Image: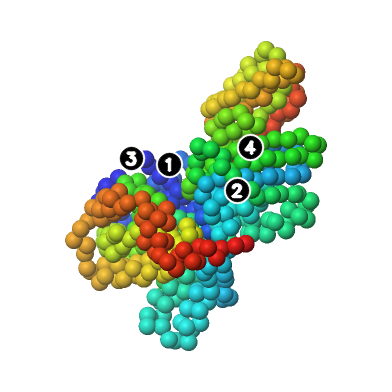
Amino acid sequence: MESLSLFDITGPIMIGPSSSHTAGAVRLGKIAANLVGGTIKEAKIHLHGSFAATYRGHGTDKALLAGILGFNPSDEQIKDSPAIAQKRGLHYSIITADLGDVHPNSVKFDITLTNGQHHSVTGSSLGGGRIIITSIDDMEMNFTGDKPIIIAHYHDTPGIIATISTLLYEREINIGNMQVRRCREDQTAYLYMETDSLCDQLLEQQISSINGMYYARIINPFDHD
Amino acid sequence: MDYREIITYCHANNITLGQYALQSEVKRGDSTAEKIKTRFAEMLDVMKQSTSSAANKPLISVSKISGGNAYKYHQYQQNGDSLLGELAANAVTKALSTAETNAAMGKIVACPTAGSSGIVPAAILACGEYFNLKQDQLIDALMAASLIGKLIAESATISGAEGGCQAETGAAAAMAAAAVCQLRAGSPEVCFYAAAIAIKNSLGLVCDPVGGYVEIPCVKRNAAGVTNALIAADMALAGIISYIPFDETVTAMSNIGKMLPSALKETSGGGLAATKTAAALSGKIFN
Ligand code: SF4
């Protein structure tokens, strides 16, 4: 029998009405924005299944948008997110879509940054505010956002992953889950890594200064409670 | 842990269920007693807000299919018209207010879920106001409630999608019943009798939200849940015992949940969600 915390029962503090369709949606939006980095110019939000069917009454659209704007699931400004997006010059559209054989509460974000870069992030809300990111730029993955995530984009040369692992080893941080996508044409690689414990800012700097690294980012979990 | 062992432990150490809950949370090693209490105090603050926000002015849900009832009931209650006593009528107002705040994208504390979030705060805060209780006692009662919820979740479920509404508003009523007993200085044993009685009174309740929205019948079931909790607590405090022990009522709830067809477990395929009026209301939902 699993032993639960009292906070699994009472809490989180959240904006209603639904932990899966509202609170989880905010987390999906926020993690998607963190994953793509940069300033977002436009977001096309594709809603699937129950998200598509009930988003108006659950405020799922407002919640996803609030997440993209960086709000936490307990922020009372969530219901005003469309106006806030407009003020900040962020264009968005809500599109109902069939994303195929995925969880009923799924969403795909097509995001364009102000620097012209384009990214897509797909994820699902699993209930109770828990989420999962299932793909980034069409690369399949399995990140819950409950654990810190390290993202790195680098020139594909041997030794980079080993260097990152050493930096983690020095801090006694375990790697939970890791995915690498390599791009033949321009010889670059993307690395996504989930760790078991919180990562510090110095680690981000150290990874960023590895030879051949274009950029590295660490996303620590936010406001799950 | 067997709930009987918890009772024995509480008696041996002369502590409340809430204090036991705190000790066992500290033992998990994630946090200190001080920090745990601070987190509960923060949640209690949000509860104070949500139990009054929709009572003082009419609040309409995001879907616009429901709302304004906490305000209506509050007015009625203040006119002295309620059939219930002051405490229970105040608890109903509070339960409706939190449930409507939730439906209107306001801030709430899931307890144990968002849909059933009105019951525990209403019971604890209405008692707190009526008997002039201290913040510490209210936090202790909230921890006792959480312990009951934890025991239910560990051996059954607190999700409407898995167990029907008996698992959400039923569990919340059991949590609230135990909390109220503790506030009235009932022993841990009495708290568990109250929780058992509250569960028995909600067995079989299906989850059938109209249009899939946590509004109809959810808001009113929060009012029903808190009155169920008060009745159960009152009976237990009067010395009435539950012939079926707490853990067996939880098992019964779990088994009934498994027997319920999926149409009655949050899919809106049956019950009130499948009525003619439900179809008309769902069709009306626009931004
Ligand atoms: S009917 Fe379903 S959604 Fe509504 S409160 Fe009960 S369990 Fe929750």
Residue A66 or A175: which is nearer the viewer?
A66
Pointer 1: what residue?
B28
The disc labelled 3 sits on which kind of residue?
Answer: Met
Q: Which mark is residue A121?
A: 4
Label count reads 4
Q: In the displayed image of the protein, which residue is found farthest to the top?
A: A158
Q: Secondary structure at mark 4?
A: strand
Please state, as top left, top right, bottom left or bottom right, where the N terminus of chain A lies in the image. top left
* Residue drawn at 63 percent across, 54 percent down: A62
Specify the subunit that label 1 lies on. B
- x and y, in percent, of residue B203 in the image: 29, 60
Residues marked 3 and 2, same chain = yes
Write down which quadrant ligand 1 falls in: bottom left
Image marks 2 and 1: residues in contact by CB distance under 8 Å: no
Q: Which residue is mark 3?
A: A1
Q: Earlier in the sequence, mark 4 or mark 2?
A: 2
Question: Mark 2: few, some, or many residues within 10 Å (few <14, many ≥20)?
Answer: some
Q: Do tag 3 and tag 2 residues touch (Cβ < 8 Å)?
A: no
Q: Nearer the viewer, mark 2 or mark 1?
A: 2
State yes or no: Cβ of the residue under disc 4 lies below 8 Å from any atom of ligand 1: no
CA gap between label 1 and label 3 equals: 15 Å
> Which chain hosts label 3?
A
Q: Of discs 1 and 3, which sits in the foreground? A: 3
The reply, left or right, for residue B77 in relation to residue B246 is right
Regarding residue B84, the answer to whether it shows in the image is yes
Which structural element holds mark 3? Answer: loop
Q: Position of residue B55 (x, y in %)?
A: 53, 74
Q: CA distance from mark 4 to mark 2?
A: 16 Å
